[in-house]
Image (spheres, rainbow, N blue to C red):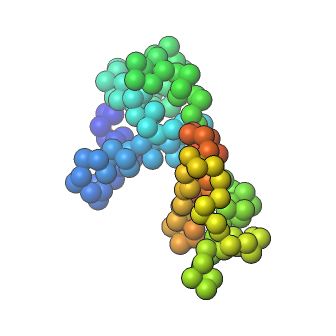
Amino acid sequence: MHGNFTNKIVGKSLSKDEKARKLALQHWLEAIDLRHRYGHNMQFYYHAWLHCDSNQPVFYWLDIQGKELNHERCPRSKLYQQSIKYLGPTEREAYEVVIENSKLIYKQSGIALDTKEGPPDAKRFFVLSVSKIMYTNINKVPFQNFQNQRFPR
């Protein structure tokens, strides 16, 4: 029963590559979870659900029937702490960059992107949407800000 759910989520046309399937499953779990819990963390609970005898959907089981489960590889506190914020169109505008005269320019402000800005240990993230729109930001602390945001479209 649970196996059919996996096929529906991942899709039959997905790459035969094991890592690609695992990554796709994690992103689907995260995207369809109303709480948008981080997909990497969700996978541990998803696999526990696969091996239990519940007939309930995975998220119902996770929040109601299996709520006492505290997975050794991802404690509940971490599961709930590391959720993803999906940005809406207005929120994304500040991060959008375009290419003008071979330079990346923030579309909203018109200011050229300086990749050297920010603390030396900061990492810059770039996201290209399915609509070919590029976004960028600096992430100073893991699991905060830009890294934990998703840009649908």
Q: Residue at x 58, y 50 (%)?
A: 120
For this orientation, the residue located farthest to the right is 109
- Count of number-bearing discs: 0
For this orientation, the residue located farthest to the bottom is 101
Q: Residue at x 60, y 40 (%)?
A: 141
10 left or right of 30 in image:
left
Residues 46 and 17: in front is 17
Q: In the image, residue 95 lies at what x, y percent?
A: 67, 62
6 left or right of 87 in image:
left
Q: Is residue 5 above or below residue 134?
A: above
Q: Is residue 29 above or below residue 92?
A: above
Q: Is residue 116 above or below residue 35?
A: below
For this orientation, the residue located farthest to the front is 120
Q: In the image, residue 16 lies at what x, y percent?
A: 22, 54
Please state, as top left, top right, bottom left or bottom right, where the N terminus lies in the image. top left
Please state, as top left, top right, bottom left or bottom right, where the C terminus lies in the image. bottom right
Q: Is residue 30 above or below residue 92?
A: above
Q: Residue at x 74, y 75 (%)?
A: 110
Q: In the image, residue 55 lies at what x, y percent?
A: 40, 26
Q: Is any part of residue 139 visible from this angle?
A: no
Q: Is any part of residue 92 visible from this angle?
A: yes
Residues 40 and 8: in front is 40
Q: Residue at x 55, y 56 (%)?
A: 125
For this orientation, the residue located farthest to the left is 16
Q: In the image, residue 30 lies at what x, y percent?
A: 50, 42
16 left or right of 101 in image:
left
